[in-house]
Image (spheres, rainbow, N blue to C red):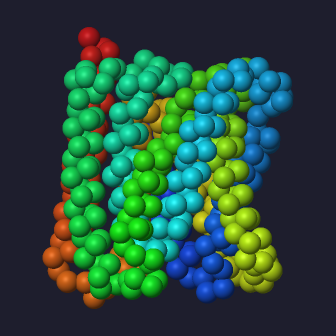
Amino acid sequence: MSLNTGAMLVIVAGLMSGSAAWPMKLMRRYQFEHWWFVGMLFALILIPWAATVIYCPHLLTALLAVPLHSYVLANLWATAWGVANILCGQCYVRIGMGLTTAILSGLGVCLGVAVPLLVKGSGQFHDAPALLSPAGLALLTGALVAVLAIILACWAGSRREQVALSASRSGGFAASLALAILAGVFSCGCTMSFVYGQGPIMAAVKQQGAGNMAASVAVWAVGLAGGALVSVGYAAFLMTKNKSWGILFGSRREFVLAAVIGLNGGAAMILLGHGMLLMGVLGASLGSGLQQISWMLGGQAVGAASGEWRGVSRRPRRQMWLSIGLLLIAALIMVLGNSLAENSRHK
């Protein structure tokens, strides 16, 4: 039951993350740096830290008991993810949400599945099976299917680019594609920050009286500090450079829309962490894979609903649908891999 509940939470988290930026489609005055600043401020700082301070007793005492290297490792992953975050936001504008999420999820699922099997995570994830175990091979097979899906998505997206986006707006499809690929390589840093930081941080916070959910939120608050600094700081730098801080407070409606982006993103992270923990020893790899796949599906849904594929011929649209189908197959293969791991543990 906990496995099913955990998988459902992770899938919902991925759908929320993939569709979180939909309010940007309704903005007219806010540029990237404005909605990104507000959204990331809420998602990475205000929401997780508010929940942590309220629901974690004796927080300072708990955090002082965590080894320094745990903070460093978690935040190195988070900083890489922060860079991916910025590139992701830029790619949303340059090549659209649908193609951006397709590229990031395809690459992110490969790394997110493989890394915790090669270098064991903290806490319960430390007992994950080996990379070449039956469960590990099943997860890798699912990741390879996802790679095929991403190739199809990129192909379809390049055809859509010829119809939907001009070179002057996108800055050139090849350059935008390169940025999306780089973001995809770093995109698993968010889940990896949780995987390698949750063991010692949760143990310390729970020892001071925090519950499971509050302790997992504390991991996000502390472990994503590096990513928060990069994401929010870059947007602040752009507003300072462009002398556009005034725009940030010039539209109450768009400020609220940007805050909704942050609320969606913050809630998605909380659900993701709790869901990964419920899935057991393979929660790191399986959770990363399912989250990335459902993240793409959420992004595709927003892209389709907002008209990104309007006017595109049937062939690219069919290729994208095939890509989505392959990602669903990849998810099923990964779930099978987790079943193999559970069966082997109970023998």
86 or 50: which is nearer to us? 86
Relative to 179, residue 120 above or below: above
Q: Residue at x 64, y 26 (%)?
A: 70
Q: Quadrant of residue 343?
A: top left
30 or 183: which is nearer to us? 183
**Where residue 191 sits: x, y (%)?**
51, 41
Can residue 60 be seen from the camera position used here? yes
**Where residue 242 sits: x, y (%)?**
73, 77
Q: Residue at x 15, y 76 (%)?
A: 315
**Where residue 293 sits: x, y (%)?**
35, 52
122 or 93: which is nearer to us? 93
**Where residue 262 sits: x, y (%)?**
64, 61
Relative to 188, residue 304 above or below: below
Quadrant into which the C terminus falls: top left
- Side of 171 relative to 300 (left or right): right
Q: Quadrant of residue 53?
A: top right
Relative to 168, residue 214 above or below: above
Residue at the left extreme of this rendering: 315
Q: Residue at x 25, y 84 (%)?
A: 312
Quadrant into which the N terminus falls: top left
